[in-house]
Amino acid sequence: QVQLVESGGGSVQAGGSMRLSCAASGYPTNSYCMGWFRQAPGKEREGVATISTGGSWTFYADSVKGRFTISQDNAKNTLYLQMNSLKPEDTAMYYCAAARGYCFTPKPLGFNGYSSWGQGTQVTVSS
């Protein structure tokens, strides 16, 4: 089972940027399908972005499209989420997740077969 550790969260003002990282250990990221999710207080967890195993294809929630970019560096076994033009509604705990298998295309945001989750990193955007 791959182990995932997120980092890079913190507090930022609206309009600012932040980059989250998800370091994977135990298995290489090029043998997993990966994605980013978030959960705000009192709300259900929602999918933010997913990526194909090779990193060529990505999929985003409408709420972040054009502002967030998911990427991965298989040499470093690390998944990233670059977040620009942040809004207060982006405030949430952000999690990365991994599912065994090779994804030629990104998993849909509603896919619930992820077997590994990180502990999360808090992102707070103030207005």
Image: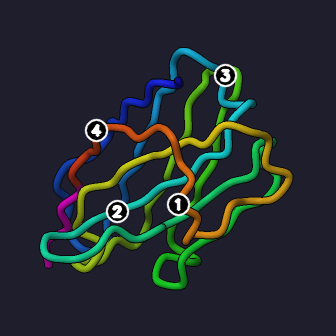
| Residue placed under numbered mark 2 in the picture | 38
Residue 78 at x, y percent in the picture: 56, 31
Q: What residue type is labelled 4?
A: Gln
41 relative position to 59: left or right: left
Please give the label number shown on residue 28: 3
Of mark 3 and mark 1, the one earlier in the sequence is 3
Q: State the CA–CA distance, disc 2 to disc 1.
A: 14 Å
- Return the residue nearer the eye: 72 or 31: 31
In the rendered view, tell whether residue 124 sits above or below residue 15: above
Neighbours of disc 3 within 10 Å: few (<14), some (14-19), many (20+): some
Of mark 3 and mark 4, the one earlier in the sequence is 3
Neighbours of disc 1 within 10 Å: few (<14), some (14-19), many (20+): few
Q: State the CA–CA distance, disc 3 to disc 1.
A: 21 Å
Q: How many marks?
A: 4
Residue 32 at x, y percent in the picture: 68, 37
Looking at the rendering, the stretch of residues picked out in magenta corresponds to 123-127
Which residue is depicted at the point 54% across and 77% down?
61
Q: State the CA–CA distance, disc 3 to disc 4.
A: 19 Å
- Return the residue nearer the eye: 90 or 96: 96
Would you say residue 126 sits in the magenta stretch? yes
Q: State the CA–CA distance, disc 4 to disc 1.
A: 17 Å
| Residue placed under numbered mark 4 in the picture | 119
Q: State the CA–CA distance, disc 2 to disc 3.
A: 23 Å
Of mark 2 and mark 4, the one earlier in the sequence is 2
13 relative position to 19: left or right: left
Residue 59 at x, y percent in the picture: 67, 68
Q: What residue type is labelled 1?
A: Asn
Of mark 2 and mark 3, the one earlier in the sequence is 3
| Residue placed under numbered mark 1 in the picture | 112
Task: Look at the numbered discs 2 and 4 and tell me whether their residues touch, using CB distance below 8 Å.
Answer: no
Q: What residue type is labelled 2?
A: Arg
Q: State the CA–CA distance, disc 2 to disc 4.
A: 12 Å
